[in-house]
Image (cartoon, rainbow, N blue to C red):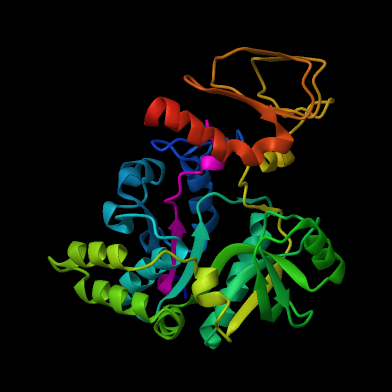
Amino acid sequence: MTNSTYCVIMAGGVGTRFWPRSRQHMPKQFLDILGTGKSFIRQTYERFAKTVPAENFLVITNHKYKSLVLEHLPELDERQILCEPTGRNTAPCIAYAAYTLAAKDPDARMIVTPADHLILNEEDFRVIVGECLDFAEKHDALMTIGITPTRPDTGYGYIQISDTNPISKVKCFTEKPNLELAQTFLQCGEFLWNSGIFIWKIRSIIKAFAKYLPEHHVLFNAVRQAVGTETEQQAIEIAFAECHAISIDFGVMEKADNVYVRRGEFGWSDIGTWGSVYQHSRKDRYANAVPSEGCYLYDTRSSIVSLPKGKIAVVCGLKEYIVVDTDDVLMICPRSDEQNIKKFIDEVKFNNGEKHI
């Protein structure tokens, strides 16, 4: 099985919710925000490297991050880095990988994963991935992994299951709900968090594109036919220029009738915000998440502080705050206001241009 199993890492995002640490020239997937000694993309590669050989990895990213991917994943060669001409959300991203793989190995199985998730219990996770690969091999199924929810989180999408078996047919997907609906989902017991990790046969996902996103199918089938020829890059540019931006959830998963979910509990988080970093960070006796060195806190509670290496910070009188310092930007805001980071970026960009973004 292993030689026909491929792992596609989606690593093209900018990670604006982690500004000012995450920047256009160095987005969050290449950062060690949690202080583990490894970047997110490095951890993602190592997580799947026991299941997938190095030559069967593909990374989809923006062309300007190609050298960063190769720096963080030296096991790969540049032919394994697929560069999107422009971002078009996850459906075109996944189509690019699937149709490219189909040209090489039409019988392949494909794991799709974001580059920036946290998984604490990786052994349990690998067992679940193996079960999904087995199920996808035996069925014409579009598999996803769902997480048993522990709280009514409004930042995640939800998946409704049809039974209590470990692998269940999906009833429906629900995008990020309001708090009242999230509480209902939690109490109901029929809903899982949508991890955004997918597993399927190449043939199954291409059949789904042909049925539910026929325009994408035509465009990326042209890419498949051009792989390895002098017209390949032209076909890629045409596909991304002409396809519309849409997520794989909206475009395929919510429409298909052969979607299955494997529930799991393995310490998962998408680490999408400073608040999620705070949640998963080690804290001092006053519930502050701070660097091991260089931070002096006085009368400060339940806050998170991020500093450049070698920098000193003295923080006094804050409660439930985010403090992020970089070489050129300092951001201080209440943890409850982190949804305003996009607004902060827009105003900085309007007044100061791109240099701080």
- Residue at 40% x, 63% y is 93
Quarter of the image with the C terminus in it:
top left
317 on left or right of 31: right
Residue at (49% x, 73% y) in the render: 251
Residue 241 is situated, as x and y percent measured from the top left of the image, at: 28, 62
Q: Nearer the viewer, residue 64 or 118?
A: 64
Q: Is residue 200 left or right of residue 303?
A: left
Q: Magenta region: which residues?
A: 3-20
Residue 334 against residue 272 in the figure, above or below: above
Q: Is residue 24 visible?
A: yes
Identify which residue is drawn at 25% across, 64% down: 236
Res 355 seen here: no
Is 335 or 194 nearer to us in this picture? 335
Instruction: Please tell me which residue is depicted at 54% across the width and 49% down the height of the picture.
Output: 116
Is 17 covered by the magenta stretch?
A: yes
Question: Residue 135: image x %, image y %?
Answer: 59, 81
